[in-house]
Amino acid sequence: MIPGGKKEGPQNPQQADVSRRRFFTLMGLGIGWGGFVAALGGTGVGALRYMFPNVLYEPPTVFKIGKPEDYGIGVDNKLKKERQIWVVRNERGMYVLVAICRHLGCTPNWFDDQKRFRCPCHGSIYDVTGNVVGGPAPRTLWRAAISLDPVDGQIVVNFNQRQDPDPKGTDEGLMVEEAGREVPPFFLKI
Ligand code: FES
């Protein structure tokens, strides 16, 4: 019983129809707002991606590698992985070899006991100056340009400015006269 003495009972057909309509109206509104919010979210994500695009960050091609006194006589291997170079120092000064094989671009390894760079891909062999003393490489290793920063005294390497002289075919391999290579900006007299 409900107050007033009327019996509770099933809704009459008119009431049921109104409830159904309200239900569908509310549901329709819900779907509409949901779509609106989703569209807004999509736009927001698009705007964010526009502000922070997918950029491939290449390592800089001009970089500093410390001071000449940081390097002893011989081949320094420590920047091979990070910068793709070897820093070489002899009695006269320093040069930088690019650690890219001139055959098909693999990365050779330095063997200090043999004083040779050896490429693991097809067996090219280079001496400490970059001359080809074995294997299929058609040219000597590149040397990158180097200079001294006048402010902090660090060595600056320009990876993309490279010395690439024509080698002579000899019994020992493909050779370039060292005197012709120890010239600025590919050699730092110390
Ligand atoms: S890539 Fe070095 S020998 Fe072929």
Image (cartoon, grey):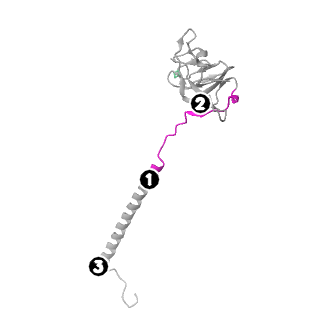
Q: CA distance from mark 3 to mark 1?
A: 49 Å
> Which amino acid type is shown beneath numbered disc 2?
Val
Q: Which residue is pictured at 30% across the width and 75% down the height?
A: 17
**Does the image show residue 98?**
no
Q: Which residue is mark 3?
A: 14
**Does the image show residue 83?**
yes
Tell whether 155 sits left or right of 8: right
Are there few (<14), some (14-19), or many (20+) residues within 10 Å of tag 1? few
Q: Nearer the viewer, residue 19 or 95?
A: 95
The reply to whether discs 2 and 3 touch (Cβ–Cβ < 8 Å) is no
Mark 2 / mark 1, whichever is N-terminal:
1
Q: Is residue 60 magenta?
A: yes
Q: Position of residue 187 (x, y in %)?
A: 61, 23
Q: Which residue is mark 2?
A: 157
Residue situated furthest top in the rendering: 171
Image quadrant holding the N terminus, namely: bottom left
Q: CA distance from mark 2 to mark 3?
A: 87 Å
Tell whether 175 sits left or right of 53: right
> Which amino acid type is shown beneath numbered disc 3?
Gln
User: Which dot, 3 or 1, sits closer to the camera?
Assistant: 1
SS category of the residue bearing label 3: helix
Q: Which residue is pictured at 55% across the width and 33% down the height?
A: 61
